[in-house]
Image: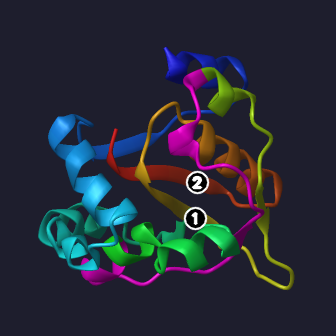
Amino acid sequence: QDCKLWCKEGVHVDHKAIFTYNQAMKDFFSLYKFDGDFLLRKVFASVLAEELKKYRGYQFVLIPLSPERLLERGFNQVEGLVEAAGFSFKDILGKREESASSSKSRLERLATEIPFFIKDGISLPKKILLIDDIYTTGATVNRVKRLLEEAGALEVKTFSLVR
């Protein structure tokens, strides 16, 4: 249903996720993101590497954390996953502070204004794979996708470890 909503808003949804979000994934992300078990970034490294190889020719761009959240957590969980898989990324996005998506309901996520921005002085890649850890409603990646397209990216695909 969320994909249909994005299509009605003029966003072409082209999202790929490797795993389904279930209790095991909820437990994994609780330990990894919220308890700070950074070694867990390696659990899915080989599977993630195989999937990311399929995006040759794309520049990887990650959904960033706000400076406050990064300081609180100590690491960007998406960055950890991508680097453990052996890939680099373009650091072109920033994020203003807001309450965490995980603390919001579906309706709150969809109603939230976009806190992301393209950093000043950045040359935008033409083909981008936008990567996040978890795709729930699609609000984050689809709004950032629209931001990148409006700024001149020719092709933006979205990707997450789980959905």
Q: Is residue 5 above or below residue 85?
A: above
Give the overall secondary structure of the magenta segment.
loop
Residue 29: name its quadrant.
Answer: bottom left
Q: Are marks 2 and 1 in contact (CB under 8 Å)?
A: yes
Binning the other alpha carbons within 10 Å of mark 1 as few (below 14), some (14 to 19) or many (20 upward) gives some
The earlier-in-sequence mark between 2 and 1 is 1
In the displayed structure image, the side of residue 143 where residue 127 appears, left or right: left
Which of the image's four quarters has the C terminus?
A: top left
Taking the image as shown, residue 26 lies to the left or right of residue 114, namely left
Q: Position of residue 57 (x, y in %)?
A: 45, 72
Q: Which residue is mark 2?
A: 156
- Percent x, y for residue 52? 30, 66
Residue shown at 13% from the left, 71% from the top: 46
Residue 36 in which image quadrant? bottom left
What's the mark number on residue 107? none
- Name the residue carrying label 1: 127
90, above or below 131, in the image = below
Identified at 61% across, 37% down, the residue is: 139
Residue 61 is situated, as x and y percent measured from the top left of the image, at: 55, 69
Say above or below: 82 vs 122: above
Question: Disc 1 marks which amino acid?
Answer: Lys
The residue closer to the viewer here, 64 or 90, is 64
Q: Nearer the viewer, residue 9 or 44?
A: 44
**Residue type (three-letter) at the residue carrying disc 2:** Val
Residue 24 position (above or below residue 54): above
Q: Secondary structure at mark 1?
A: strand
Q: Which residues are magenta?
A: 82-106
* Residue found 67% across the figure and 28% down from its top: 108
